[in-house]
Image (cartoon, helix red, strand yellow):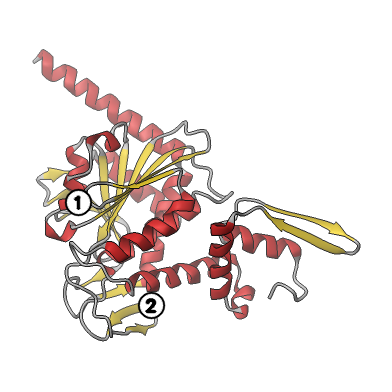
Amino acid sequence: MVTKEKDIEELAGLLLALGNKRIYWREQRNSYHLSLHLDRPQLLDLAEKLNLIQEKWLDQGIDFIKEKLFKCQVEQLLMTPGSSGNEGKIRNYVAEKLKPLVDHITIDRAGNILAEKTCKGGHGPVILLNAHLDTVVEIESDREIIKDGNIWSSSNGILGADDRAGVAVLLHIAEYLNTPSSSFSGKVKFIFTVEEECGLVGARQVDDYFLWNTDAAIVVDRRGTGDIVTSCGGYIPFCHPAYGAFFEETAGEEGLYGWKTTLGGSSDTRIWASHGIQSVNLSVGYSHEHTDLESLDVEACYRTAKLIEGVFKRGRELKGVLRQIKREENINTIVNKVV
């Protein structure tokens, strides 16, 4: 694919889409010289991605290739075991993928993956991204993923999309934030929790200091499509209404229709909200979780990734929304003290 005659700008666009920050090329004796400044792990990652690409994909454009690679990532995650309390393999896989994409990464005493990245000048909101590593029971080792178009299921036992789908979305966003197309300025924190299925065990053990100065959280661990969960059962609020509305507006502006704020159940979102962090939990396309009937709409999963991309594109608007929410909270605090 590379040695055949290809448009140099098309090739450079492909390499940028695969996560390379900079591509250098120049014309030399009626040919082009192209160079990549990569370290060994980055070069290996690029080689693995190129190995997945089929030549027929090239005619479909960069966006098509990105979606195909996302689905390959989802499939790899669905084949990696890691039930509650036994997350070692999935944790190692995610940490290896995440390490070159962030500034700092560590495993805390509970086994959660904690990571941080400062984007551009860092003069913007601090956003927490969260998904959980564990499945409610172990993925069957001899099972196959049945693909009926965009609907995937398991030949035996659970599929594991709760919450492997959310993990895939977060890894996609980590890559997106490292591309030239990302304009977001601020800080992003990643938390991949353990033992969520046992009662939010991992999230409860995250040290408070890691959550300091966090303005907002985006959790990706909701069944179905189009849900922006803003409360637990309607009686434990996760965020100010304006924060949920921002996601609805962003979805519409990105041409991702059908997203609406709604109440939902318990999740790690509840923990972040208890720290005073504006939080939502987004649908990621799975259904019938925790059963042999579990399935994943992988196209809907990708749309969730595109919605979060849209949120980061609007970093300045988000900063304004969060500032207004904080202003209202301060006013209410003053009024309550006076009363």
Q: Where is residue 31 in the image (x, y as percent from the top left)?
A: 85, 65
Q: Which of 225 and 188 is in front in this view?
A: 188
Q: Nearer the viewer, mark 2 or mark 1?
A: 1
* Residue identifier under label 1: 202
Q: Image point 75% across, 67% down: which residue?
A: 7
* Left or right side of 42 for 2: right
Alpha-carbon span between mark 2 and mark 1: 31 Å
Q: Quadrant of the N terminus?
A: bottom right
Q: Position of residue 234 (x, y in %)?
A: 12, 48
First in sequence: mark 2 vs mark 1:
2
The image quarter in which residue 215 lies: top left
Q: Image point 45% across, 67% down: which residue?
A: 70
Q: Are marks 2 and 1 in contact (CB under 8 Å)?
A: no
* Left or right side of 324 for 240: left
Amino acid carrying mark 2 in the image: Asn
Residue 253 visible in image: no
Q: Quadrant of the C terminus?
A: top left
Q: Image point 56% across, 64% down: which residue?
A: 44
Extreme residue in the top direction: 338
Task: Assign a secondary structure to mark 1.
Answer: helix
Circle 2 crowding by C-alpha within 10 Å: few under 14, some 14–19, many from 20: some
Extreme residue in the right direction: 29
* Residue identifier under label 2: 150
Q: Nearer the viewer, residue 245 or 106?
A: 106
Q: Where is residue 3 in the image (x, y as percent from the top left)?
A: 74, 74
